Amino acid sequence: MANTRITQGVIKPNEDYDTRHINSTGIVTTTGLDVNGNTDISGNLNIGGILTYEDVTNIDSVGIITARKDIHVGAGVSAVGVITASSFSGSGANLTGIDATALKDPAGNVKVQAQASGAVHTGISTFDTVNVGSGVTIESNGQATFTGIVTFGSSSTTIDGDGNTIKVGTALTLGHTQGLQFHTQNLHSAGFEINQINASGIITASSFSGDGSNLTSLPAGLGTALSSTQSSPLNKIYYTNTVLPVNSTVTVDTPASASAAYTQYADISVGSGADLIISDGDDLIPDVLGLRPDGTFGGGALGRMRVDKLVGKDANSAINVEKGLTITGITTSSIAHDVGSNIKLGAAGVVTATAFHGDGANLTGVSGFATALSNTEGTLENLIFKTPESFTIGAGTSTSIESDNTSGNTLFTRLGRINVATGATFHVSAGTTFIMNVLNVF
């Protein structure tokens, strides 16, 4: 078709025109534009409606392409410059220039840095449970479990859960069994073993024991005040224990300037295997305050010593009792003793005397059918007798009696009645004749 030139005319509506070029210096207004070939626009293209692309192969833009919602690229995006978006989604496996060994906070500070040996955390890291192998577990509730020995420093401090001990070097040990041990000093259930206490203040305890010879401002050690409060009257009222135990061998040896040794204890008890030795020329006065119930207060000399053996100082000689010996209890001897010319104490336990006086009710091996009403000879009561009528064999007791040929196979008693309790037995052997109430008084 030949080119048509329209000059000074009017393009009529509803008419078709075939043109080659349209050169317009103004605005071209059209209700529709159908372009089958290439379109070159050297200026701006303003579209108030929707620009729809169909079968577009490439978009070549030297500026910024802005889309209201999405840009869908099927085969990929090749960009020479920077792609900026409010967010990216999808796989970033093929992205380059990204440090995948570190996690950063919004300010760009590295918080977790990967290393060949693990990861380094900076700041606070929160985990539900942290397991280090099979031996360490740290839980979110604050509980940590270590199955082995925990060591701090260069093997100087260790916590041993199996042995229940905590050791700080070689000097300090805290354990379930030994308590607290520092060098040779121990604090445990039996007490506190300590070499020395240096205190500038007051040391208070329920009781003190040990050597108090170097203590100052103490009264004479003859008693313990009932109160430690100086202003209290009880601080001037004292008590003393009754027994002084001597559990190891000691020797009483007073200086030449002393007249005697003494103690406020009323009794001195010498333990088994121990010796209390009084040196030659020395005296030991127990109960110097005279506090025994049978003594005179302040009188002294009524104390006593409780020992199982008295020997000379050299352990081989006899003791010398200068002023006599008063015995109120039982005296046992393995050798015979003569008391004056009338009494002989035999080694076999036999006592021989010209006469005996007193109550013989507890003597054994003495034949007698009755007890005199009085021990005073020459009186009527000494010639009048009494004897028990009956005897009871207690429950659970078994008694059997038997005579022999030398006694005519006969036994007798002055008793009129023998009571056998429930559960007890009384047996007279076969061939033995037993006669009761032999005096015929019941």
Image (cartoon, rainbow, N blue to C red):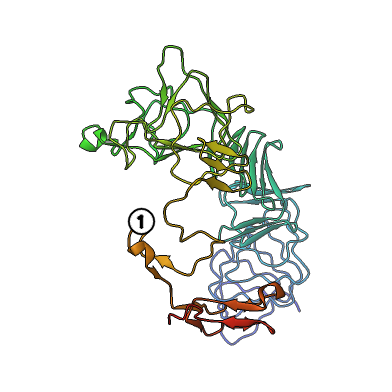
Farthest-out residue, front = 378
Quarter of the picture containing the C terminus is: bottom left
| Residue 343 shows up from this direction | yes
Residue 372: x, y in percent? Answer: 39, 64
> Residue 99 at what x, y percent from top left?
71, 50
Report which quarter residue 182 is drawn in.
top right
**On the picture, is 381 further left or further right than 268?**
left
Q: Does 156 appear above or below 21? A: above
Q: Residue at x 71, y 75 (%)?
A: 405
Q: Position of residue 270 (x, y in %)?
A: 53, 37
Q: Quadrant of the N terminus?
A: bottom right
Residue 396, given in percent of the width and then of the height, sits at 57, 79
Count all numbered tags in the image, as a single digit. 1
Task: Kindly identify which residue carries mark 1.
Answer: 376
| Residue 398 appears anywhere in the view | no
Residue at the far bottom in the pictured view: 14
